[in-house]
Amino acid sequence: MDKLVKNKDTTFLPILLGTDANAYGMARNFHQAYGIKSLALGKIPLLETRHSKIVQVQTCPDFDTDDKFREVMDEIARTYTPIYDNLILIACGDRYTELISSNKDWLSDNFIVPYIDLELKEKLENKEDFYNICEEYGLDYPATVMLHKDSQPPFDLPFDYPIAVKASDSIEYVALDFPGKKKAYKANSPAELEQIFADIYGAGYTGTLIVQDFIPGDDATMYVLNSYSDKNGKVQAMCLGHCVLEDYTPAGIGNYNAIIQEGIQEVYDKYKKFLEDIGFVGFSNFDIKYDERDGRYKVFEINIRQGRSSFFTTTSDCNLVPYLVQDRIYNREVTEVHYHNNPALWLHVPPRLLLQYAPERVLPQIRQLLHSGHHDCTLLYDKDLTPYRRVMINRFYHQQWQRYEDWFNKLSIND
């Protein structure tokens, strides 16, 4: 066991599963709200949480396997239950949400586990089931066709090219390795779709392939919704972000690198009803795109955890962590839902890069928020900028320039 995390306040200890920017953002949320240090568990140490004063990292190379996960979590429970009154589990990646849901009953003996049961999780994360649920509860989503391993080209699609293509099973897909692999694809022709199909299934993928109508529009047509629902399935707080710059690297397509918080009550009302109707609990994260053709906000997916870019909520003064703590630690009910609306700019790239690559129509608001100081970066926490972290993080942000030069607007199979 590594050096123990010993906070003066022993009411609870946040245990973060993951060591990336998502984990650091959650550690910063807890530190800003309560002045405490978190414990992060993962496979390998990553830059974002390395040499930090607000999160201690403990790694195990095969931590994401079922047997090792149970072994490590049993050790964590034995070590920290004598020290803290409560241990809160927070997943910071899809594989960790799967491990938590699969072991929820066993974990609940020693940890607070603010997650839905495995059955609902599998329905929401299986895209085919999720879109059926969207249909049932009235959530708009892009026109979609499901392809399977035994599907035969030419593929008959009810919409025109270009199209979007993505593996339904993200956990199985991320483990594959093949030339030209991207997290998601844009196909401009039937030939490109057939090549993507052959590449993915040829690499050993066995799940469903999602083929969707490609909604036109630049980065600023994307939105991300984060919320927290209490243990009774009641939404406590919702915070919507307006994306102004996406990630274009092959492994990062679909992630966000700059977000302006923007409250839209129409979206809040619809998704609050959805979450409460299905009995959702814990953090949720929706990826949504505004379709200018029909004026509808169309959802791509739900994550049953906070997103990688969820620190945008705290940047705009909507830290969701206290809602979790009030609910699960102090058993206090919030009687009035908080619908956040306080524009601020969250960044995961240098400001000058954002000004160069963001859509022109959002540049005036970006400049205004930069000039007024209403902006922040997850990793640039003034209470945790040791000399090492300052150098390494600035180097990381500088490297973003080359990534955009190499990959900006290259979404199709042949880019």
Image (cartoon, helix red, strand yellow):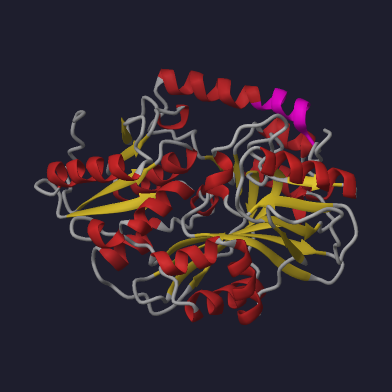
Determine whether, in the image, residue 110 is placed left or right of residue 229: left
Please determine whether, in this image, residue 251 is positioned above or below residue 148. Answer: above
Report the residue at 37% width, 59% height from top.
Answer: 101
In the foreground, 125 or 173: 173
Determine whether, in the image, residue 111 is placed left or right of residue 214: left
Report the residue at 59% width, 72% height from top.
Answer: 268
Q: Position of residue 70 (x, y in %)?
A: 26, 46
Q: Position of residue 399 (x, y in %)?
A: 64, 22
Report the residue at 68% width, 44% height from top.
Answer: 201
Q: How many marks?
A: 0
Residue 123 showing in the rendered view: yes
Q: Is residue 407 magenta?
A: yes
List the single residue furthest toward the left.
Answer: 82
In the foreground, 407 or 349: 407
Report the residue at 71% width, 31% height from top.
Answer: 352
Q: Position of residue 396 (x, y in %)?
A: 57, 24
Determine whether, in the image, residue 47 is placed left or right of residue 154: left
Res 119 quadrant in image = bottom left
Please determine whether, in this image, residue 400 is positioned above or below residue 162. Answer: above
Please determine whether, in this image, residue 214 is positioned above or below residue 59. Answer: below
Q: Predominant secondary structure in magenta?
A: helix
Res 241 quadrant in image = bottom right
In the foreground, 140 or 36: 140
| The magenta segment | 400-408
Determine whether, in the image, residue 415 is placed left or right of residue 273: right
Q: Is residue 289 magenta?
A: no
Q: Position of residue 13 (x, y in %)?
A: 24, 48
The image quadrant where one finds the N terminus is top left
The image quadrant where one finds the C terminus is top right
Residue 265 showing in the rendered view: no
